[in-house]
Amino acid sequence: MQTAFTVLAVSAGFVVVIFTGGLAVLFLVKASDGSIDLSRLISEPNGDASMSRLQLLIFTLVIALSLFLIIIGNTPLAFPASIPADLLTLLGISSSSYLVSKGIQFSNPAGVARPGISIDPGQTKFTAGAAGTVSFTATHSTNGAASLPAITWSLDSPSYGTLHASGNKASYTADATAPANTKVTLRAQVSGFEDGLAEIVYE
Amino acid sequence: MATAQLYSLIAAAAFWEILLFIAGLTALVAYQLLTRRINTQNLFCGVRRDGRKYFSPERVQLLIFTVAAAFQYLRSVMLVRHTGQFPPVPKGMLELVGSSNVLYLAGKSLMTLKIPGLNSSAGAKGS
């Protein structure tokens, strides 16, 4: 009986270690290839990076690493007998600062407004069956700046026509096979911004 | 293999697993911050009441003191980790981080909030 429990305990131990290890590897791989998006880890609702979030992130990682190093420093492995009040104060300062900072920020609509992208022209019309090309330009909807982070241009379904994009400009070539009364939506995406949309209409 | 050795093997595997995960996560976040895959746009900028952005020195000093305090504490932990106890946080470090945060919040309040008689026109005139 004793042996059976030992086998069970050892097996359970290996299963837990392998499972958590697999989860950890999966998370790191997906976070590094972008499947788990960390791009807005320290971002505010308005798209800007936040210093108080960064501070909280740094202290959290440091305390997590410290706790781990201290636990493995004990023989046998053990949780530290006490957590110094000063350490809690340090985390408290960081967390309080973060909360007060959010309070200040949310008291001002400009601090939380999410910026958008404008596409010019907003609407273009083609005659069905005819050829044609039109150029679109994306700009920051608030200040009109053309310098935006990497823009992803795409056509929503039905995606008639072809698109050639370069930076904040995209050239659209009409599809002669597109039927009349079809609307194609051109979309410009930038991380942290509301998508910019333009309409292409086949009449 | 003896049962005690199997338990040791599990403990060692768990140790390396957690160490590699925390180290990997830290490295990943640091790499993505430095290559700007994690958005750092306007990290040193604040937003005025009228929506305009401004360069904010109080954010720069907060980052400097935060990184300095983090490295200092991690160094203390490395020195005393064999004791199995957290090292004390130096009083000076607490005061420094606290003052830095107060300065950051004061600067942010001044530029963001409307404080009658103090900054009623600051948001509109500054650059």
Image (cartoon, rainbow, N blue to C red):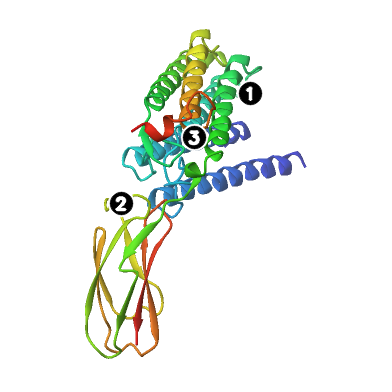
C-alpha separation, residue under disc 1 versus residue under disc 2: 48 Å
- Pick the residue in front: A184 or A157: A184
- Pick the residue in front: B3 or A135: A135
Secondary element type, mark 1: loop
Chain ID for label 2? A
Chain ID for label 3? A
Quadrant in which the N terminus of chain A is drawn: top right
The mark that comes first in sequence, 1 or 2, is 1
Q: Amino acid at mark 2?
A: Leu
- Residue A53's mark? 3
> Would you name the residue on which mark 1 appears?
A79
The mark that comes first in sequence, 1 or 3, is 3
- Pick the residue in front: B23 or B48: B48
Q: Rate crowding at label 1 as few (under 14), some (14 to 19) or many (20 or more) other CA atoms within 10 Å.
A: some
- Residue A148's mark? 2
Residue lying at 29% horizontally and 51% vertically, measured from the top left: A145
